[in-house]
Image (cartoon, helix red, strand yellow):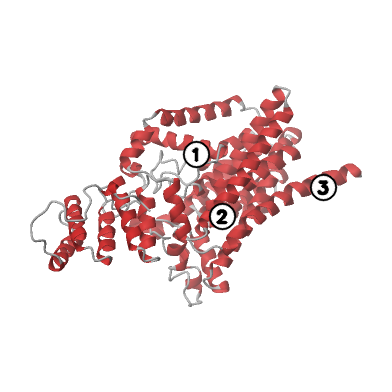
Amino acid sequence: MSHVLMKLRAYFSLLFVPPLLAVLLYSPAILFDFAYDDFFQIAQNGSVLSSERSWRSLFFAFLEPTFPGDLFRPVTVTTYRLQAVLSGSTPMAFHLLNVLVFGGCVGLVGVLYQRVLGVISLSFLALLWFAVHPVHVEAVANIVGRAELLTAFFGLVSILCYVNSVRRRNTLLLVASLASYLLASLSKESGLCLLPLILGAPFFLPEREKEGASPFPTRTALFLFLGGALAVVGARWVVLGDLFFQERDLTTYYVENPLLQEAFFNRVLPGLKGLGDSILLLTIPLHLSADYSLPAEEFWSRVHSLRGYGSVALVGVYLFSLFAFRRERWVYFGLWPICTMALTANILTPIGTLMGERLLFLSSIGFCAYSVAVVDHLAKRCSSPRVGVALVCLLIGVSTVQLINRLPVWHDNGTLFRATVEDNPKSPKSWLNLGLHLYSQEQDYPGAEAAFRQAIHLEGGRIEYYKNLINALLQQQQYPQALFWIEKGLEVSPKNADLLKARTQVRALFRPHEEKSSPPGVYDSPGDISPP
């Protein structure tokens, strides 16, 4: 009897302590404002905040593309819409649901860890690390990160239902697994990548060895899941129409990812570097940023640097570890980063971003368990199990401190953009976002001017930087400087209608007495002005 009570107490600790800790640590985010893409997808989205209450208005996301127009995430957007109907447009309710969904994800991850690892102490340590891992901050504290949270939640439900359906030969559980998989895939496209992890899960369960049940999916299961995946892709095709295949107009769309224009073979090396950087960030999450974009020249120089080749080599080491531990059940978790980053590594197909912490949420589910299991395995082989536990506890402690320090960054746009230019000062996009915020929200025109100048200094070929800098100068009535930068912008885009019109208007306000290559007070190099 006492043995049963101890086992129940251990299960209680596993399934309730880490989720409660996660909710507690993220509870300050409930009081945060909207930030970054929250404004485009929620706060300024008329369809989400509409006062209409028809069925079509409630579930419009299943019939329309998701912002910015080439995405299809109807389940996630529908949760925004239903929340707006029930609680209005205040951010508190949206943040609260994100925190609660994350707590639910932690609980489901705990169940999966225990089913595969079979050792409560090992599962508990891995789950603690997952609960406090700082790469989750963006997915939880930024409301639009709910796409990742819902994909993980429904994906985990699908896996657990499927393994139980195989064990019990229960058709109802198989249908529930399929429904959850569809919800995950309709929450975000990366949910489609969970298919091999769902169908492959029974191969790694300890009861398979005891009961001798066949882990292979039945023809019915294969037909249902493959058909479901094709149905999601088909629905995306129908809703997006021509945008399903249409490439973005790179003359007007900000190219955050230099690989958008590259052929497949040109993407392989930088894609592998990105995978290596992601594995390193999951292992040692010390330097975090809301923006990992870089100018094309800086990006390629990093790809072909010693560190870049080191990141590629790290991918090789990781793949070798999967081969070395192929006979261990917990190698299942090592497959998670490979499967879940298949669509986001920019190798198979380029996406809109180079790298993002929220993109690592699904990968971290498997990575935390795999890393803890590897450390435990190696420590036991060296007859030093306590060293392994100490190392994992150190990772948990460092991650907790980093989470607590990182969370306030997402309080609001001002805090976020100021932190981002410190985290990634070589990103022109970071400086652009800061400049736009200073210009439109704080009316700090000198600060906006400095931010836009820095963006031009980092990447001088983007016309939007010049336009915003000119606006900041005009607000300060600095007409000579504005005219100078109009001419600079026309060197980049000689036929730009906006700049040609602005030149005529500014010349009417300012007519220099003599032609000068640089008007008084204007710096020859944008980099001569220090950023704020």
The quadrant in which the N terminus is found is top right
Pick the front one: 351 or 270: 270
Q: Secondary structure at mark 1?
A: helix
Residue 408 shows up from this direction: yes
Mark 1 surroundings: few (<14), some (14-19) or many (≥20) residues within 10 A: many
Q: Which mark is residue 481?
A: none
Pick the front one: 215 or 446: 446
* Residue at mark 2 to residue at mark 3: CA–CA distance: 29 Å
Residue to which mark 2 is pinned: 140
Pick the front one: 138 or 226: 138
Q: Are marks 3 and 1 in contact (CB under 8 Å)?
A: no
Identify residue type, mark 2. Answer: Val
Q: Residue furthest right?
A: 1
Q: Name the residue rendered at 32%, 54% in the picture.
A: 450
* Nearest-to-viewer mark from 2 and 3: 2
Identify residue type, mark 1. Answer: Ser
Q: Secondary structure at mark 2?
A: helix
Q: Name the residue rendered at 26%, 47% in the picture.
A: 460
Q: Earlier in the sequence, mark 2 or mark 3?
A: 3
Residue to which mark 3 is pinned: 9
Pick the front one: 270 or 323: 270
Q: Within the image, what quadrant is residue 372 found in?
A: top right
Identify residue type, mark 3. Answer: Arg
Q: Secondary structure at mark 3?
A: helix
Q: Is residue 210 above or below residue 482?
A: above
Q: Are marks 1 and 2 in contact (CB under 8 Å)?
A: no
Residue to which mark 1 is pinned: 278
Task: Give the percent coordinates (x, y) of residue 178.
Answer: 59, 52
Q: Earlier in the sequence, mark 3 or mark 1?
A: 3
Q: Within the image, what quadrant is residue 301 found in?
A: top left
Residue 115 shows up from this direction: no
